[in-house]
Image (spheres, rainbow, N blue to C red):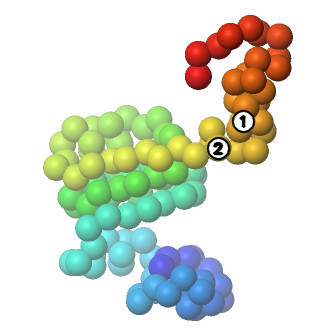
């Protein structure tokens, strides 16, 4: 568990059952048993993913990013960068998909 806010860190660690806690991302990367990371903050994904890949650590992001350094790191690393976008499952997108599927939008038959 990592949070730069020390006051929230212990509560989050306990709530999620994490064994360890960190306030510094660089310290996480030094952990020899670390094999993969999941990261959610868009503003930090490029830099953190790039650092992880350069250390051979797999990285899963829930947000898409455009970053030349990340692209180079992906090409040079044996570790994988994975992107698991979940935006298509928001309530409004699921609703529109269902309306299209039922042909309720005046579009006629549409492949789904």
Which residue is painted at 35% across and 42% down in the image? 70
Q: Nearer the viewer, residue 69 or 11?
A: 11
Q: CA distance from mark 2 to mark 1?
A: 6 Å
In the rendered image, which residue does mark 2 sit on? 89
Q: Position of residue 69 (x, y in %)?
A: 35, 41
C-beta proximity under 8 Å, tags 2 and 1: yes
Task: Choose top left, top right, bottom left or bottom right for residue 4.
Answer: bottom right
Q: Is residue 46 left or right of residue 15?
A: left
Under circle 2, the secondary element is helix
Marking on residue 10: none
| Residue visible at 46% across and 52% down in the picture | 61
Residue 93 badge: 1
Residue 51 at x, y = what percent?
32, 57
In this rendering, does residue 74 appear at all?
yes
User: Where is 6 relative to 44, above or below?
Assistant: below
Locate the C terminus and report the quarter of the image it occupies. Answer: top right
In the rendered structure, the answer to whether residue 42 lies left or right of residue 84 reads: right
User: Could you say whether the residue bearing mark 1 is in a helix, strand or loop?
Assistant: helix
């Amino acid at each position: 568990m990592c949070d730069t806010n020390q006051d929230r860190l212990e509560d989050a660690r306990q709530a999620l059952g994490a064994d360890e806690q960190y306030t510094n991302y660089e310290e996480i990367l030094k952990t020899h048993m670390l094999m993969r990371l999941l990261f959610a903050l868009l503003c930090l994904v490029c830099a953190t993913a790039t650092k992880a890949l350069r250390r051979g650590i797999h990285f899963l992001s829930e947000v898409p990013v455009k970053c030349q350094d990340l692209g180079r790191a992906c090409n040079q690393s044996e570790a994988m960068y994975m992107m698991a976008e979940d935006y298509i499952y928001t309530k409004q997108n699921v609703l529109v998909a269902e309306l299209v599927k039922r042909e309720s939008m005046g579009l006629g038959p549409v492949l789904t």
